[in-house]
Amino acid sequence: MKRVKPFVYFAFRWLIVLFILAATFVFGMFQGGFVSWFLFYSVVIVFICSCLVSCLSLFGVKATRHISKQELRAGEEFNVEITISRPWLLPFFYYEASDDVPASILAERHEAIFFFTLKKELRFSYEAKALQRGEQQFGKLVVTANDLFGLIRVKKRIPIQTELLVYPAYHYVKHGLGTIGVSHVAKQLKKNHEDHAVSGVRPYVAGDRMAQIDWKRSAGVGGLVTKEFETDQSEEISLFLLPSVVETELEKEWFEESVSWAASLAATFVSARTEVGLHTYPNCWNQLQLNERTWKSGLRLLAKVKPLKTKKQAHLPPNLQLLGGVTLLITPQIEENTIRLVRQLEKRKTLVFVASAAPVGEWEQEQFKRLKAQLFHPQFEEGKRQSAEIA
């Protein structure tokens, strides 16, 4: 029905024009004389000129698009400015311009109308809001030229490729993991495992705890030696965003929520000046050491993360033997690979935390409990849902 109405209006306009032309022609035939024929030919000339102007008014028309921010967070607003350039002597009655906005960008007014002017450049701008993270592509600009009577509409599609990178929304995590420093967690971890996680000995250094001194070996070598634990080898925090296949809208929500959680935890650690190793899987496993200098690079990685196409595509992260300290696993939903990864990390005697956007079943909870992995759900600070800027 919506397609029928424009056609009916278009046909109705042409019927009116044909009726006017026929009426002036009949008037000239019956009335005769200069005035009646002058009226007929004037109407014909005006009609032809109107159609010609609308057909010719788009030759040489170009356009550019400028956005106020090339990179921004999901939920943040930005400005888009469109500039239409045309030859100075090119006539037109009026233009209609409509910008092609991606579906994940909210823009209420992205159209404009320009009436006859001698200006070479026509500009309009509008405010937009990024609703979803990822790489957003603005497409073509459609410029429509109209005649005086609305009989002819000539469209020109001008391709303008504009890219916008939208970071995931991130917030400060309330209490617990979000504010724990590396040293505190590492000390707690060493205390829990120091009785059975000895990897070797080293010469005593001033400041070592008395409980770490190996008295038996010290007596044999004639000097104090200190036990070296596996947790001493690496005390950093490792943050993994586990990939997953998305097949339904609910699974898509879980995936996007897990990306936001990973960004929020990373933002909380970086704001506390705590270095954290970020592991993501865009196409293969990537690792980035996050701090205040590399924070933007981490956000770019999280912005480009996409779901897996098939479950066979997922692989366990490499070099797990190099991990230590604390490992945080952020996953859209608990899968077989998640439990396999926790099992591998448990062999390393690392402290493992698992956050799942999807509800966790009883069987999965029992598995994590047996593997000494802790389930948690990030809680955000009230009144600070929007992240503070990190230098």
Image: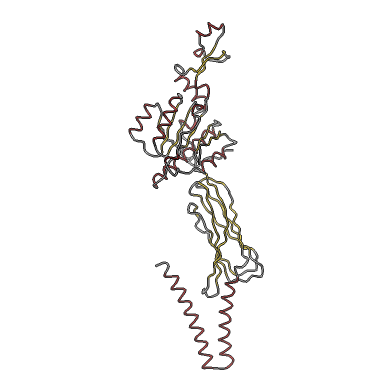
Q: Which of 8 and 179 is in front in this view?
A: 8
* Image quadrant where one finds the N terminus: bottom left
In the depicted structure, whether residue 198 falls above or below residue 237: above
Residue 151 rendering spot, x and y as whole percentages: 51, 74
Give the left or right position of residue 348, taking residue 146 as reference: left
The colour scheme of the drawn protein is: secondary structure
Q: Residue at the location (43% across, 26% down)?
A: 346
**Seen in the image, is 225 located left or right of residue 243?**
right
**Where in the figure is residue 260, as x and y percent of width and height?**
47, 41
Which residue occupies 54% across, 69% down? 154
The residue nearer to you, when weighing 337 against 67, is: 337
On-image quarter of the C terminus: top right
Q: Which of 354 and 149 is in front in this view?
A: 354
In terms of image quadrants, where is residue 224? Answer: top right
* Residue 95 placement: quadrant: bottom right
Q: Where is residue 155 in the image (x, y as percent from the top left)?
A: 54, 67
Q: In this view, does 22 lie above or below 263?
A: below
Quick check: 354 above or below 201? Answer: below
